[in-house]
Amino acid sequence: MSVTATNAPINDKREIFGWMMYDWGNSAFSTTVVTALLGPYIASLAESTDSYILGIDPAALYPFSVSLSVFLQVLFLPLVGTAADYTPNKKRLMLNFAYAGAITTMLLFVVKPDMALIGTEGAVALGCILFIIANLCFGAAIVAYNSYLPEIASPDKRDDISSKGWAAGYIGGGVLLAINFGMLSVMSDTGLAVRLSIASAGLWWLVFTWLYPHKRLVQRPANNKLPEGASLWTFGFKEIFVTLNEMRTKMPETGRYLLAYLVYNDGIQTIIAVSTVFAALELGTSSETLLLLVLMIQFVAFGGALLFGWLAKQIGAKRSILIGLFVWAGLAIYAFAILSNDTELFVMGAVLGIVMGGTQALSRSLFSQMIPEDSEAEYFGFYEISERGTSWLGPLFFGLAAQITGSQRIAILSLILFFVLGIALLIPVNVRKAMEDSGNDPTGVVL
């Protein structure tokens, strides 16, 4: 691990590449585990028991697990951000959580029907518990990872570097998905192939974390110090309320943007998290076809992230995000009213891929412009509460709707509200004022 540097250069290509490659590695968890395979696999195991597990319908079990994992993040991630800002251990925190999440993901390999001692119902419960732990670690590592962006990139380059980081993630996740697709195509034991694919995502995450960010990211000294006699955890809880009050009184535009982001990103993350379960249960789409779909989305999203990075240079990040959100709202309507077969599913997937990378990459870089120096990780702790694959309101609404109606198609209606409300909240946000209030210079940034 690199030593702490007091004068680490900004816009250093070697460090930026190492930062981007973490996205290459950890995106395997988002794509193979969260988006492609674990949801349908857990649902199929639960349905094979012919009974509700913990009183939960099999179709709602995975969305509820996603929701619970993020409820825990609401409590935990702001504390991780404070720890990263007030101790010289941000890099170590990031790596430790990344390695823990990767290993927990690999342990999902043992989840199978008729497990010794605990049976299929126990296996489903174990799979949900391991996923919740892995997702919590994923989010904690991302808090520190995202907070590196203002440290390694100047304001005028953040949209571009953030977009390229997301693009690297889509390619990295796509390469592993291609390997998983080949595995599912040639292996006669589909269940074993799914378990191997899920475990491979953890191994991919671990290996690329060690090869690049472990070796290339520089640990900068913490400019904040804990008050004398204060413990990190007690101070961290207190700092959560201080930060929220600071956004309310001193940086209201940042607070408004974060609220808009939490709302619209819930819709985005819910579609990502439940889309394959929706396709499997409503359309009868096979595991092989689902992998091919997600694989296509990954490579389309690579181009979409770069396209939106270019668009932000022309019209600004906020306007580019709004364009993407109108498309997301249209996709939710399309899924409810039109989607009925695999061909239409792939058409929807192509459009989804274009806006998926762009809206997420620009949302991250735009937020980095609105937060004060030396508190990046703390603010990104709040941001990460609703970051990719970790939303909670959306899955909760979707899960409740599926539980009550027994139809995921009807449940998809609940997601339209998140995009409409997100757009309404984002439009009045004054980006220039947000930057100035947080002490950042808007010069050179397209607004």
Image (cartoon, helix red, strand yellow):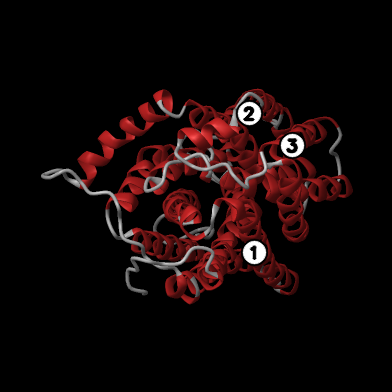
Q: Position of residue 97 (x, y in %)?
A: 39, 59
Q: Categorize mark 2 by other alpha carbons within 10 Å: few (<14), some (14-19), many (20+).
A: many
Q: Position of residue 141 (x, y in %)?
A: 43, 56
Q: Secondary structure at mark 3?
A: helix
Q: Quadrant of the N terminus?
A: bottom left
- Residue matched to label 2: 426
Q: Position of residue 31 (x, y in %)?
A: 63, 57
Q: In the picture provided, is 23 more to the left or to the right than 244?
A: right
Q: Amino acid at mark 2?
A: Leu
Residue 87 appears in which quarter of the rendering? bottom left
Name the mark nearer the viewer: 3 or 1: 1
The one nearer the camera, 266 or 32, is 266
- Residue matched to label 3: 328
The one nearer the camera, 121 or 436, is 436
The one nearer the camera, 127 or 313, is 313
Q: Are marks 2 and 1 in contact (CB under 8 Å)?
A: no
Q: Which mark is residue 168?
A: 1
Dot 3 or dot 2, earlier in sequence: 3
Residue 382 appears in which quarter of the rendering? top left
